[in-house]
Image: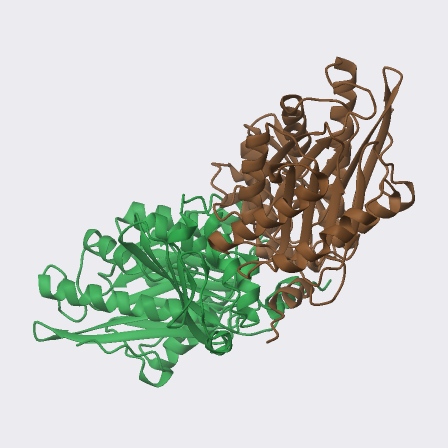
Chain colours: A green, B brown
């Protein structure tokens, strides 16, 4: 029923949305850094935000706006190159000014403009540069694939490629489309949200109907991944529903199909974000099984995924499972080492906490693939989690240690 | 009163101990990998072990031995090149066999021989190679600086230099010496213990008297450091007291001076371990201040010290304090960003959670030093912690991703 598409040639557009992007001079490189998405008059919205106590100005402003409008969004304005975080009162005011100006163009209050920023922390947002480019953004917006691609490119920072996924399904004789656009690359360890993710659908739904759908779709995808363990200050996932397809979420079959479509899109975006992580050479699909609860499985997964020693072993395709076992041992869960099994690919490399006969060369070859499964069973219960993560390479260090003044 | 000595030329030997080391062929390199320390007949002991649920065989055997003897240790046998961890029942038996053989040489039960191992996890311990070399170790032991240096070299793995510190003080007309020997380099984030640390003193004390002294000395030193956030499976700190100096811990002044001496030795060893961390180019003395409790300060310090983004910024001497602030924000403490101050060296770079006027070039130059102070004040209370940590370099990745089969 659902076919997942994330090759750029096949991106499907939901009805009722227009997109545009320009270069506003925020990025030193001169690349596009300002993006607009316009939703129809009656679009509804739900959002998840970073749980970092240090939240960027657009997170504060966007959260307050959604509360004040009860979940109405007419337009989304995103800039890259500057996070507008740790910028104090002036940062909030700059963000509000951008929303006000954009609101004027659309004839709506500032609160119906949803702001996002991504880039360096602690540097004043050049709001003037943004405001100067809003009319051009407004004039060039279009409900086209070109517009979508421009949007996806303009929100990138250290990403090497745009991240898009879409799903189209039929329900009650209507065609419904879900489109997702994301950026990632670094400071990726979302906790109830993730970097910048925008989900557009033409279904008709109230904000109250959208919220559980969004939470559910993110739970197993965007909330189950980590590149470097650092939770960003700007993480935002926004879901917009234009209603233009005529299909209604109130209909149970439509809701079920939409839920599956959202999950598929979020899962694809999570995979795209992780595989484009800074310096990433290997993506690891980490399965933690036999935990007492999902939280316990997540704790084990996160500890493994954030171990510098495990991640560097993965960089070298080194089947050094002792480091994985040591990470499990220190994660805080009272595991019994003699009940732990570890698999690399389909091969068991650690049986009951100790080495077992295995083909080490084959384990090395498995880990040398761009994507590899690692499975850890802890023998405590029935719960499991699938967690997407990456290796830690010298290239990651180079990207993040690069200082030039 | 106390002069800290860790230049190799001035290592002071406590009375009542002998040392030796040989190459037993456990390390592929053929370097010395088996070390012996002998204590007098009446030596007492206290120890701290890793809190990792995956504990190596020598940790299990050593802990049980100390319990069964009530804190008596006649000899310490350490091998490097193999951790004897995740080796199951066979690993325990191999460890016990080594202790039994060594005990025979000294005419004591196996339980008075304290074992340690460090090296790769999950590989069978070549106990035969060790047992074959015990007589040579026994025959060549000596109460000499040469013996101490041989011991310190033989316990090294990826360490580039031996780690020693000693303090001598006078009390009640007696001369008391504390000598510490450690190894470190990787998998360093001790939790109530640390990699391998041996502390020798010639004071006279019961095991019960030694325990609080050891715990106190480690609290602010070996327990307040991290290289890569990975807690080892073999962490052990052992304190031995020979009584040969004639000074008694029962005497309050002696206990106070001993406590200060132990703290100074542990602090020096912690500094030596961190500055010899794998691939380390910069050591950061991280001060977290104004926390509600010491635990809260430690949580903030550990989150900063384990942030891949913060550590890679330090590798590039990049004064990117936004990453530090973002780490503080996600650590779980309900901080108010507007009360956070961050200093690099003596210069404030973040005032009340936002950028303040500062000389960025100077901050860069400060961070480019081999050792740099970073101070984070969170405006919540009176507690503070001093935490030793490091940058994360491409060389760390190279060392730990190096896979060759």
Out of B182 and A307, give the one closest to the viewer: B182
Q: Is residue A194 left or right of residue B338?
A: left
Q: Which quadrant is home to the C terminus of chain A? A: bottom right
Residue B388 shows in the view: no
When the figure is inspected, residue A116 is found, relative to residue A292, above or below; the finding is below
Q: Position of residue B9 (x, y in %)?
A: 92, 45
Placement of A146 over or under B322, stated as above or below: below
Q: Residue furthest bottom?
A: A9
Using the image as rendered, state which of residue A297 and residue B347 is in the foreground. A297
> In the picture, residue A285 is in which quadrant?
bottom left
Q: Indicate the position of residue B321 as horizontal and vertical percent values.
A: 63, 50
With A19 as the anchor, is B271 left or right in this view?
right
**Residue in the image at 56% along x and 58% along y:** B121
Q: How many marks?
A: 0
In the image: residue A258, left or right of residue B256: left
Identify which residue, B250 or B40, lies in the foreground.
Answer: B40
Which image quarter holds the N terminus of chain A?
bottom left
Is B8 above or below relative to B213? below
Q: Position of residue B361 (x, y in %)?
A: 77, 55
- From the top left corner, tell me how far across and down residue A333 is, in percent: 41, 45
């Amino acid at each position: 029923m659902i076919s997942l598409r994330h090759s750029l040639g096949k991106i499907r557009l939901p009805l009722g949305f227009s997109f545009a992007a320009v270069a506003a001079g925020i990025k030193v490189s001169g690349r596009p850094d300002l993006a607009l998405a316009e939703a129809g008059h009656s679009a509804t919205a739900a959002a998840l935000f970073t749980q970092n106590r240090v939240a960027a100005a657009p997170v504060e402003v966007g959260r307050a706006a959604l509360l004040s409008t009860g979940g109405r969004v007419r337009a989304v304005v995103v800039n890259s190159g500057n996070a507008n975080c740790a910028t104090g009162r002036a940062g909030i005011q700059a963000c509000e000014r951008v929303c006000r100006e954009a609101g004027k163009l659309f004839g709506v209050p500032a609160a119906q403009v949803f702001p996002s920023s991504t880039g360096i922390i602690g540097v004043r947002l050049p709001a003037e540069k943004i405001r100067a480019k809003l009319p051009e953004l407004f004039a060039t917006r279009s409900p086209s694939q070109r517009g979508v691609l421009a949007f996806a490119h303009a929100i990138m920072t250290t990403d090497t490629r745009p991240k898009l996924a879409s799903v189209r399904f039929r329900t009650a004789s209507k065609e419904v489309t879900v489109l997702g656009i994301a950026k990632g690359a670094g400071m990726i360890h979302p906790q109830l949200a993730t970097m910048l993710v925008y989900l557009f659908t033409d279904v008709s739904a109230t904000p109250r109907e959208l919220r559980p759908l969004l939470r559910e779709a993110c739970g197993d995808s965007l909330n189950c991944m980590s590149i470097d363990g650092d939770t960003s200050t700007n993480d935002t996932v926004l879901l917009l529903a234009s209603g233009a397809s005529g299909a209604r979420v109130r209909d149970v079959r439509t809701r079920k199909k939409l839920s599956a479509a959202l999950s598929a899109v979020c899962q694809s975006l999570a995979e795209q974000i992780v595989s484009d992580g800074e310096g990433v050479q290997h993506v690891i699909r980490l399965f933690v099984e036999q935990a007492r609860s999902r939280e316990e499985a997540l704790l084990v997964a996160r500890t493994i995924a954030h171990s510098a020693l495990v991640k560097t072993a993965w960089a070298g395709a080194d089947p050094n499972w002792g480091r994985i076992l040591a990470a499990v041992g220190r994660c805080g869960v009272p595991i019994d080492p003699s009940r732990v099994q570890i698999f690399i690919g389909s091969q068991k490399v650690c049986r009951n906490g100790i080495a077992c006969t295995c083909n080490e060369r084959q384990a090395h070859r498995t880990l040398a693939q761009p994507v590899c499964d690692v499975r850890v069973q802890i023998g405590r219960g029935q719960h499991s989690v699938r967690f997407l993560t990456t290796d830690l390479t010298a290239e990651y260090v180079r990207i993040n240690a690069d200082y030039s003044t």
